[in-house]
Every structure is written in structure tokens, then in C-alpha cells.
Image (cartoon, rainbow, N blue to C red):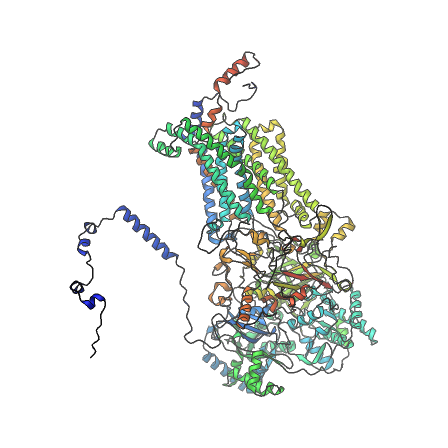
Amino acid sequence: MYEAPIREPLILGDKTNHDITEDICRPIEGKANKYWWWCFIVAVAALLWWVLCVAITVGEGIGVWGINNIVDWGWDITNFVWWVGIGHAGTLISAVLLLFRQKWRLSINRSAEAMTIFAVICAATFLLTHIGRPWLPYWLLPLPNQFGSLWVNFNSPLIWDTFAVTTYFTVSLVFWYTGLIPDFAVIRDRAKTSATKFWYGLLAFGWTGSSKNWQRFEEVSLVLAGISTPLVLSVHTIVSMDFATSVLPGWHATIFPPYFVAGAIFSGFAMVQTLLIITRKVLGLENYITTLHIDMMNRIILVTGSIVGIAYITEFFIAWYSGVEYESYCFINRATGYYWWAYASMMTCNVVSPQLFWFKKLRTNITFTFVLSIVVNIGMWFERFVIIVSSLHRAFVPSEWGTYHPSWVEVGIYVGSLGLFFTLFLLFARFFPVIAMSELKTIVKSSSTQAKREALKHGHSHVSHH
Amino acid sequence: MSNRKYWKSIEDLNRSPEFVKKAKNEFAEEIPIEKFLSNDALESSKTPRRDFLKFLGFSVTAASLAACETPVRKTVPYLFKPEEVTIGVSSWYASTFDDGADFCNVLVKTREGRPIKIEGNKFSSFTSGGTNARTQASVLTLYDTARIQGPHQNGKPSTWKDVDAAIESKLNEAAAAGSAIRILSASVTSPSLNSTISDFISKYPTAKHVMYDAVSYAAIHKAHEQTFGIPAIPSYDLSKAQVIVSFGADFLGNWIAPIQFARQYAQTRKLSNGKKEMSKHYQFESYLSLTGANADVRTPIKPSQQGAAIVNLYNALASKAGVSTLNANKVSFAKNIEKAAHDLWENKGKSIVVCDSNNPNVQAVVNGINNLLGNYGNTIDLTNPLNIGQGKDTEFTNLVSEMKEGKVAVLIMLNTNPVYTTPKSLGFEAALSKVPVSVSTADRLDETASKCKFVCPNHHYLESWGDASPKAKLFALIQPTIYPLFNTRSFGDSVLKWTGNTTKYQDYIKAHWEKKIFPTQSTELLFEDFWMKSLHDGIYEVPLAAASSVTWNFELSGSASEIAKETGSELEITFYQKIGMGIGTQANNPWLQEMSDPISKVTWDNYITMSPAEMQKRGFNTIHEKEEKMNTVNLTVNGVTLEKVPVYPQPGQPEGTIALALGYGRTMAGTTANNIGVNAFSLLGLNSSGFISYYSNKAIIANNTEKHMVVTTQNHQTLMGRNMVKETTLAEFQKDPKAGNHTEMLAISNGHEHKKVPAHTIDLWATKENPGFAKPGLQWSMGIDLNSCIGCGNCLIACQSENNVAVVGKDEVRMNREMSWIRIDRYYSSAMSKEKAEVEKKGVIDMYHAMEVPEENPQVVFQPLMCMHCNHAPCETVCPVIATTHSNEGLNQMIYNRCVGTKYCANNCPYKVRRFNWFKYFENDQFNYNMNNDLGKMVLNPDVTVRSRGVMEKCSMCIQRIQDGKLTAKKEGRELKDGDIDTACAQSCPTNAITFGNIADSSSRVSIMNKEDRSYYMLEELGVQPSVFYQVKVRNIEESTNQHHS
């Protein structure tokens, strides 16, 4: 098979299979460094703050938040949609890119999937805490019950949400875990203490590394990828229907499903960037997560960011073109009303800033990417805030126009959910292999790479190999 | 002896040997006890792990199950069931609310012996089944924890025996010494009470009864004495008036008998396809009153110009009548005076001019105007005058001087709180301290009672017998609906006791009616029958004599020259009463405190109203937002200063004037009312005639650095060019009854051609076979006539009382979390409109910004809004747990038990009528209102669930009343009739603006109303098919309102 000599390797540093094992297992087998501890302490502190704020909310009632009878959803649903959106990149990377045989995904898919799962957990906490009677969320599940013929309302987008999110979570979790099995087996086999051996042995699920194991592993991965791929589209489509199926101007829009999916991928990739740029630094994985990966992901950010931008403009166009008074006012108010700053932040962060990625210099600049990935997620948070709050605060009847300001408890729950997320992610980085090492080994071609390099050195223009 | 043999079984009969053997044993079969006991396992005390786990599991489960048990609440059943009380069935009693400030004939609904709801009494020709917010709320005042629980002496609880002995001896001493005894009360319209007071006066000849009203109508009294020789307040009949001109009189809100006037006024405003004439209403006023908000032509004037305005009107009419004119200062709004004069003259004898001034000179000129117009004997009746508002300011001020001089030995007070309601400059408090024996009969240790030697608490009217006569020849009865909650005594009984009369007041009333009132009728032969009928009806009316003509006997030039002396200043102030608070008698009533003011929509406060332009000029903050506090000022009027009075922007407030509501700033009314707002009564002063004046031509304001949070239930003031409220002018309506009521059209395509169809006819669910859902049987619907609705807010309190709606407090109102199921949206007109923007080529952003600003003197619309009970309800489809569903009677129902509180329904409600329980609003010290104490909870309607925290709630169209009505009809074996069922809001609406009924019945009132051309559904184009419809508001003005859409 012909291979271009100029093609950049997917991982750097002339890694051998053994190197990979050593590099990936080092954080798990060694002691955590002080960066990890500092991050962990901050994250756990934020998590405890989350516990306090949730306790206040459950104890007193959601009146401790700033939402009111005019704006009934505020930071809670904003955060929910934001987290669900972030959760999109993981599945996209592992499933869609697997199906498209994008090998560069292998350095990042593990942590992206972990991020997905933790993000969905964070999203779920908002679903649970935002309801008036948080001790009854199981009523949203179609469980057999003794309430007579009481059932859930299958017309309600919130029920679709329940199904979509739980399905997504389950499939992502299984997919992630399946991928982890061979890696757990590696750690098990390298274990020096019996406890480690026992626990990782348990997690490894009796993996022997036989060809049959590998064959089944490949098949399951493919099947799960097939199941996951539609979920990438469906989850945020359904989340968008919470809004799109309503009668509210600013929510009632058929453009929402594709627009939300693009936005979710956009924010998911930005979050992956944020996490990986930190991870590669902290865990010393620069050779595995290279500028190439960052560049690739930045391209996706650029594309999805542009889609989102077009969606924003389309919304405005339709508001004007439809001639619906309420719709057009809603958008005028969005851009010029009480929450104009949120709209402006959204436009700047989501539409303007990703356009800078047209420049390769910026796309491959790690510091710039890191800053921009955070900017994008700020923008995507504002997008949900704008959709939810700016539509609700001035809906049909002017007498019921008002404003919304979050209370410290709401802010606390948001900050705390970041704490929850990072606590989980840091634990993951400490105890689980952050890169799918077994799979990664499939792309290591150390001998051929060496041969290529040799050939280049000796002036041969082409190298072929089998 | 019998040979009969008894046996237990066949074996017993046969007595087989085995049987005989076995019969000796205790158990027929052998039980292996030995074997069981010899089991070794039993002797070992070891508990195997599995058993241990079983025991553990069992005990934990048992303990947790026991802990899960709902707390047991014991009820005590009736040992002997009272005849009138059936558990679960309400009893109704006719009674009368008359606290000296408000008068209303009412029906009291009681459940299990507790009054829980006030309704209007339709038998009364006076209030005709209407009530006002304060009447509705009076039932909660009964259950006020701040009520005093027994007689007090020198500030300490005492007994009636001791108190009576002390007071009687003091009375005797005073009478013997010839020193003055005074009874000070608000207007007493009760014939029996007046009779007991005369008995009292005959026993103690030095006694005198002085009546004083916190808001006085003495000038009207005085003026009629001067001009016609009849010292009375005439009865007014607005229903006969084609032209109504009011100078500041808020006759729909507070002036004299607002419930009656509102009903009469609405009669002149009702329109239908058949009736196309309505009255024309001019209002000249110095603050935006409820009445002014309803006026066709409203002219903002400075209070100092009022007299001049009236004299100018007199002159305009005098020149038409050809009589001599008076000396008058010029006014800037002469054009409107001229127009009013023209319309009045065109409708001589069918018009009315009223004025709120407490200056007899001004009232004399008003009388002159009505006399010129020949209104006396037509719309104004002096033959059968009103008994309301009899207080005489001069008698009161004389009393205060007597008290100051130490001449008054005993002062007994009823229904009055002068320490709070009198101007500070009058020095009543100091005067009171000079009275050796002061007796208050207040229901609480209020500002006055706390300074009295004796407090002899009067019953609440719902505990009490009594009678009232608001108008000549109209007699109403008050009957108890509950045994007195506390050791209180009705004032009548107290007076009888002190007079030495041992008759019970109840018997006294009966005797009085037998002697004085029974003979005026001939339909009932026996007094007992007459009494029972009157008690049942709550009212007895002697047929009225035709109003006899009156003779004018006064020279107005003196009055006019007095009026001409009036000077203005750069800042003048008017004092007014709020619809909820009135004079503040029921200030401790949380329903009234939280009731939003119909105009400003502010709750829990009084404040200076100032025109937004003037506020900007003075550098005050005009942006009202929930995180934004208002500036405060120190206000000085008549030498008295109130500090930190917030300033609130009020369109329609004339520049150079401010207004401040009375009734706030209570200090001893109870925890709810204390220190809410400022006491504007303290700023009042006397005018040149010695009457209390409710305005001052000189107010001084000095900026205070502190800011104050003012909270409202409505943040946005204008309609933004939307068509929620449709309106038109009378001329346009007469041309086309559908004027202003254009249907929203939508262009659709059937594949070949585009055509426009009414937007509401496009239906996602309809099929060819079934173009709309069939609606058989009952389909509840409600019609609201925006032309009749005056925005008084009676329905708000009626609904709150009926449906156990929680009070949430000021800060939660600020958070937009008020719970009221029905609200009245009030919009001010804006100078900007879509049409105008088009002409002026204004951009859409600028247009909307301009639309947010109310006009300087805005037209006002009111729109009551509750759950629309949409037949394609957007809330129902989005609820994940089916907690809100549709009934087959067209009702959108809330199932509280099932609600988990996602609030999605509220977000998806286009009308925003859903209310969420953000907290637990009952038994929660953070919400220390009536639902937080056992006494206050007695007012709760047992038919309506008290909602728990975390659930959504909203208007149910009084489903409990619907069920009750259906069951009653079923029990009586008949079909439901139109009018059997009325919602709380509709029942007591003083203007009958709300009609409720079954729209599937084509002959029901609501169906007939629905077919009128003025009827429209709000936001119909959304296709949600609401069940509540409105009727277009019609203004009797010349210019086009520019509000409707084409």
C-alpha cells in the first residue's frame, strides 16, 4: 500500500508498544503529582459546595433560586443543555470517527468518552434538582405503579428527554467500558500488589487477550459504534425539542434540532480541547496528543461553529420573514433588550471567535486553542441562556414581562457541577488509562516509520511497503 | 324435662371408643410438643449470620415502615350535631359589612361553623350582589391573631365585670359632676345602635355622640345644608346619568358607596349588538384614580385648580342657562371644561357632577351645577339621602379642643382609630392623654386603643348581631355566623350594659325593628315572619318615595370668591385611598396588603406618585425593576415631615403634583401591617372652612440618600402594539359592531392558490370528518366584558378567599412569585404605535423602545386574566407526568398530587397564568401570614386543597363550585340551569363584567354573550382554543384609538 512520506505520524516520539504501555500506565501505577492533588482539592471543594447548594435547594424549595413565575427555567436548564451538549463529543469521536476509520481519534477517544459520561451525569443532576419535588423524579419513568392506570405522558418532550438521556448514558457507558477492558487487563497483568491485581482483574472481566477476545472486542465495538452514532444526533435533537415543540416565540423553531446538534458537537469538542490540553501537560502525554489532534479538533470546531453561526442568522431571517409579530419582537429583544449582553457574548464567542481557526498558525497554537476552547464553551453556555431566558422573559403578554437573576445557590450549583465533573475526571485520569493504549498500539508502525525516515534521509522520494 | 339429645358430630352421636378416647385429650390430634422441645437448636442461643441478617432486615423494615406512617390528626366529632351544621355542606347567612368606611350587603358562607367566604347579596338594591376587595377580605380579619382576646384595663387583661364596674362608676361620676361624656365613632348607620346611644345619652345627659370619618364627606353634608337646607348626603343614581363629570371623586373605588356606584356606572357602559349607547365620563383629577382610569376623557389638574375648574364649569353652564356667572380664575384646560359643559347641557336631568372636595364652598358650587342641570330629583335624590359618611369635621375638631382643655371626662370610641387617622397637627394623641377615662372598643390594641384606659373589644361583624341603614328607608341586618372567638362583646351590648339596660343587644335590635320598621310594611302580618324574612334576605327596603323637588336657596358668589383665593404652588399633594387599604382599618390583612394596586400594581407599600418626566427632572430613578430600588424623599406637608418616602413613577400624575395613599404606616395593627409604608394621615390639615383637607397646595420634598424597594405584580406598563386588549370608539362601534375586533388572518396554500383564512381555524388535530372536537354536554366558558370591567380587584380577593391562594410576602412579589390565580393586567397607552412609526419612518427597534414608554396622560385598560382553559392547551401536552389534563367539560385541570414541578407547563403557557409553589407557603415561619397559625387557617376553604411546595397551581374555574352545583342539581333530580354555578370572581363582581356558564347551551348567558360582535378570544391565532373570551372595550371619545389591527 502506498503511503505518502510526508504524512505526519499520529503519535510522536518513535513509540514502541512497550513505550506506550509504560507511558499510559505510569500515572496509574505511580504516585499522583502535586498538580493532580491541587486540581483534585479544588475540584472536591467545589463538589462539596455543590452538595451544600443542592441540600439547600432540596430542603427549602427551588424558591432559593432566582427563577420565577415569568422565567420558570433559568440557569438550571441552561446548565443541563450545556452539559448534555458537552457530552456529545465523546460519542462522536469514538463512534462516528470509528465508523469513518479516523485513526487519529485513538489518542483522544478514551478521555472524550469519559468526559461524555461525566458531563451527562452533571446534566442529570440538573434534571433532578430543578424539579419542584426532587424526591419524585422516578415518576418520569414509565414504571408499573399502584397509582391506578397512571402512566407518563408520551407526548411530552420531557419524557423523550428522559429516554434520550438515559439511553445515551447507558450506551456511552457500555461503549466506554468495553473499550477499557483490554487496557484494564494490561494493568492487571502488570500489577505488583494483590489489591491492584484483584480490582483491575475484576474490571478486566477475565480478558485473556486471545484472538477470540480481540475478535469479539472488535465486533462489539463496531456494533456499539453503530448504536451510538444515531444517538449523537438524537440526544440533542430531542433536547432541542423541549424548546422546538413549545408555542413560545424564540423556542418554537424547526431549525432547532440540527442547530442544537451542531452546537453540541461544537461545545463538546471545545471541552475535549480544554481537558486534553491540560491532561497532556499534567500527565506528560505530549507525544500522544499532538498538535495534529488539536488541529483536527479545531477544524471540527470551525465547521460546527460556522453551522451554529448560520443557524443564528437563519433564526433572525425567519423571524423577520415569517411576519409573526411575537417572533420578530423576540429576536429584536434578544439583540437589543435587557439581555443584549448575553446575546452579544454568544455571538462573539460562538460565531466570531471560531473563525480565527481559519489561520493554521492559530489552529496549531496550543495556548490559543486552550483559551478559545474556553471561550467557545462560555459562548455555548450563553447560547442556552439566551434561548431560555431571553425568550421567556418577554413572551406574549406584556404584563407578564420581567427579568431573572440567578441566586447564589443557583450559581453555586453550577460551579459545584464543574467540581463534580472535574472530580470525576481527575479520578478517571488517576485510576483509568486515559488513552486507549491497546487500540493505540494498532497504529504504531515503528519499523516502517524508521524505514521511511531512513529512505528520506537517503534521498529516495518514495518508499513502499506492505 | 326434654328428651332431646344434643350432639356435636356424628362421632359424638355414635360414641365410638376411639372418639371417647380422643375426647379426653385437649387436642384431637397429637401434637409433637416433646419432639419440638427436645430440639437442641432451640436451646442454643446462637444467632446464625443468616438469621441475624433476617432479623436485622425485618427490624429495619418494620421501623422504617412505622416511621413512614402519616401523622395522626384527631378530629372531634359532634356528640350532638347542631341542626344547621352538616359536615361538608356549607350554610349561608345574609349579613352586612359596615365598618364605618365600607358598606356592603353580603352573604356569608360557613363550613362546619366557620365563616370562610363573603359573597355579594343579590337581594340588596344597594350593592346588588357586588362586593369590593375589602369586603371580601373582611372574613380574614375575623381570624387575625392580632385581635385582642378580651377586655383590658390600663393595658392589662381584665374581666368584663371589672371593666364594666369601673366604666359605669366613672360614667356616673362624670354625669354627676356635669363633665362631658363623649362617644366618638365613625359614621353609625345602625338604627338600633343609634337608639342605644340615645338611651345612653338620656341616662347620662352630659353625653354626646360625635361622628368622625377618617376620610370625611362633611363638606357635601354642609353644602346641601347651605344650598337646600337639607343637611345630608344625597343618594346618587349613576345608572340614569348619560354624562358623568367627576372632579377627583373616585366613585368606583372609594368615594362614599363605591360598590353601588360601580354597579350603576357599569349599567351605563354596557353595550351589545342591541344597545349601542353608553354614558360619557369626564374626570378631572390630581392623581390617576381607578375612576379616572376608566374615564373617557381624563384631565389631570393640580389640586389647587379644582375649585376654579368647578366654578368655570358652573359659569359655562350658567351662560347656557342664562343666569349670572361667578368670579373665577382661568384654567389651562378650559377646552375640556367647555366640552364637559356642552355634553352636560345636552343631557340636562340625565347627568351628574360629583366632587371629592371636602371644602363646602366647592361642594356648594357643585350643587349649583347639578341644580342648573336639573339633576336633583333625577339622578340625585335628597329625599332619600345616604346615611354613609355622616361624620362632621367641625364637631370632631371641637371635641379635640374640649379634650385638650380637659373638659372631657369619659371618651368612648367605636370603629375609629383617631390617633392614627387624624392629622398630626390636630394633636389628638396629646388631647387623649388629658381624658381621664378613655374607652376603646377596637378589635386590637391599635394606635388609639393602646393609649386608652379601657379596651372593651367589639365583636367582629361576623360574630355579632346588628343592623345598618346605608340609605334612608333601607335596612340591613347583621347576624352572627360564628360563636365569638374571643372574650369580646358587641358594642351594642356594651352600651346597653353601661346604660343599665339588661336586654341583650340581639333582643334590643329585634324590639327596635318590631317597633320602628315592621309597621312600615304590610306584606307580612306577623312580626316573626317579617323578622325571619328580613334575616333571610339580610335586607328590608321600604318602598322609596319619589324624590321631591328641592328648592335652591343660596348665593354662590361668596363661595366663588373664597374659591378664587386658592393659590397653587410648584408642588402640590393629594392624599388618596388605595383600593385595597382604604383608610387602613384592615391593614393587618395580608390579602389586602398583597393585593396589587389596580393602577400602579404595587403591593405592600404606599409611595409618592410623581410623573415620570418630573422624576427625571429631579434626578430620581424612573426605572422600576426587581433589582432596582426607588429613591426616597423626606416629605413635609403642613409642617409635618415623613422620612424616607419612596417616589414611584406614575403616568397621568400631573406635573407639579404628587400623591400619597392613606391607610399605610400603621404601627400597632399587627405584625403584617406594622411599618409598611408611611402614615399619610399625619400630614393632613384643615382647610379654610375648618374641614379636613385631603390635599395641600404646598408639599416640600427633600432628597433622602436611602433607597427603598417598591414591588409590583406587573413590570411592564404598555401593550406594545399587541392585540391582547382590543378597543374601539363608540362612534366606530355604532357604525360597525365588529369595530376594533378584526380576526387575525393567515395566508395558506392548498397547492394551487394562496388564500387568507382566520388563523384560529387552522387546526393540527382537526380532520375532515371532525372539524373540531365535538363538545357535548357541559363546556364551561367565561366571558369578560372589558367595557364593564373597572379593574377594581374585587375578583382578586374573592378568588384568593375561595381558593386558598397563599400570601407570599413582599420579597417574593418582587421576585415575580405572587400566587394570585386571577390577575388584572393594566396597560397604559403609549404615544407610539405601529401606524405612527410607519408615518414617522421610525425603525422597528426605536419603535419598540418608544412603545415601552406610557403617555403622559395615558388611556388605561384593564384586563382580568386567569387560566384560559384552552381546549388545545399547550400546558397539557408538555407535562411529562400528566399532572395537567383536560376534562370532558372543557376544563384544564391541575392534579397537584401528580405534579413533580418541572414548570414546563408554565413556560409553555402563552398567557402566563400558572403559579408555582416555590416554597411551602403554609406552616412556614418564613411566610408568617394566615396559613402559619391555627386561627388564620380557619379561613381556608375545605373544598380546596392547600398546595404543597413544588407543585404548579392555577385557576380551576372554581371546580369545587362546579361540582357542588352539579351535585345539587342531581340531588334535586333536575338539569343544571344557567346561573346555578358561578365562579368566585364572577359572583361578586360589582359591575357584572364576568359571565360564567355552559357555552354548549346556546341559551346560556355566556353563549349569548359569546355571539356578540365584540367578543374575541385572546391570542386566538395561536390555535390553543381558549375557553375564556373578552369583549372589545369601547371608549366614548371622538378620536380614533389607533389600537386595533387591520
Q: Nearer the viewer, residue B850 or A306?
A: A306
Closer-to-camera residue (B45/B412): B45
Q: Is residue A143 left or right of residue B773?
A: left
Q: Report whether residue B656 is seen.
A: yes
Above or below for A435 versus B286: above
Residue B151, x across and y down, in percent:
48, 75
Q: Residue at x 46, y 25 (%)?
A: A441
Seen in the image, is B111 located left or right of residue B1006?
Answer: left
Relative image position of residue A374 (x, y in whole percent): 56, 36
**B206 or A413, which lies in front?**
A413
List the single residue furthest toward the top: A458
Residue B817 percent location from the top left of the image: 56, 56
Is B976 situated left or right of B728 in this image?
A: left
* Residue A78, quarter of the rendered image: top right
Residue B225: x, y in percent? 70, 80
Q: Quadrant of residue B541?
A: bottom right
Regarding residue A412, the answer to whether it shows in the image is no
Please identify the quadrant where the N terminus of chain A is shown. top right
Picture mark count: 0
